[in-house]
Each structure stands twice: as structure tokens, then as C-alpha cells.
Amino acid sequence: MDRLFDNCGLDQLTVRGDDRGSLVAIEGLQDVPFQIARIYYIFGTGPGVERGFHAHKALHQFAVCVSGSCTIVLDNGQERRSVRLDRPDRGLHIGPMIWREMLDFKPSTVLLVLASAKYDEADYIRDLDEFHARVRQEHL
């Protein structure tokens, strides 16, 4: 794993295939560091549309751009980093308390996201100032 932060990094996924094509299988607790409870994908994002703008208190996510590309800006409360997802054999693990912004979606982009828990609005932090305040409080 190429670490970006303590609980965030890029993983190379194993590609299997032959002359018929390629296949990537992702298994919970093997290819991702959590049990998979929810799967969703983002598609049809228009030009210039930005998404995300939140952090999760406890949720782990693993994002793979299975088609097209997008940029994910990550913020751990002390530092911001950008990651370009543009290959179906690279996944981004985003642990809890990482702010994320998704932008620069190319046409036909499909972003697959595996999550460690079902949707829970109470797990979201949707205000960047609140997120930074929580991070500062955790580091006291």
C-alpha cells in the first residue's frame, strides 16, 4: 500500500485474465482491510460537478475508478493531498476522519465504493470547519 496518511492509502489490486480479458476480484478482509457491508457506485457526474465534501467518524471506504477517472482530495486535518484514480486495478482506502472531495470527473466515469457499514447519516461530518475542530480536539 502506498500510504497517504495513517489510515489512508492506494492499493494495487490483483488483475487476473487471459486472452478473453481481465478480472479484478475484491474481497473483504483480504483485498480491503474491512468487512464489506455496502457497495455503491457514482456515475453520470456532469462536467465541473464536485462531490463528497464530507468525512466519516467511523466508516472505512475503498474506492476504485472502474471506468474513466476522477481526482479525490483528501484532508486529515493537518495536510491535504490529491489522488488521481484512473485505473481499475488501483483502489483508494479512506479510513475514518478523512475529509474527501471528489472532482474532475471525466465523461463515462464510474467510481465504485465499498463501505464498512450501511448508510448512517449520523456518521457524516459535512462541515469542514467542524471536521478540523474535531481533529484538533482528538489531538489534544
Image (cartoon, helix red, strand yellow):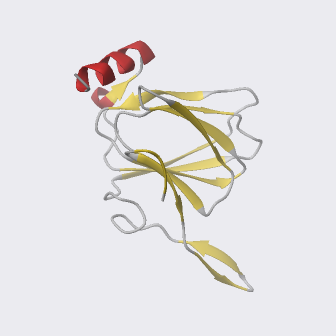
Q: Is residue 44 left or right of residue 124?
A: right
Q: Residue at x 31, y 34 (%)?
A: 120
Q: Is residue 6 left or right of residue 104?
A: left
Q: Is residue 93 visible?
A: no
Measuring from the top left, give residue 113's x and y in whole percent. Answer: 49, 49
Q: Is residue 102 left or right of residue 132?
A: right
Of residues 134 and 136, the one nearer the viewer is 136
Measuring from the top left, give residue 139's x and y in whole percent. Answer: 26, 26
Q: Residue at x 70, y 38 (%)?
A: 105
Query: From the viewer's perspective, is residue 88 above or below residue 55?
Result: below
Measuring from the top left, give residue 8's x and y in whole percent. Answer: 43, 46
Q: Quadrant of the C terminus?
A: top left
Query: From the viewer's perspective, is residue 6 above or below residue 15?
Result: above
Of residues 98 and 41, the one nearer the viewer is 98
Q: Is residue 117 visible?
A: yes
Looking at the image, the residue that sits furthest to the top is: 129
Of residues 118 and 74, the one nearer the viewer is 74
Q: Residue at x 37, y 21 (%)?
A: 131
Q: Is residue 67 left or right of residue 72?
A: right
Query: From the viewer's perspective, is residue 14 above or below residue 79?
Result: below
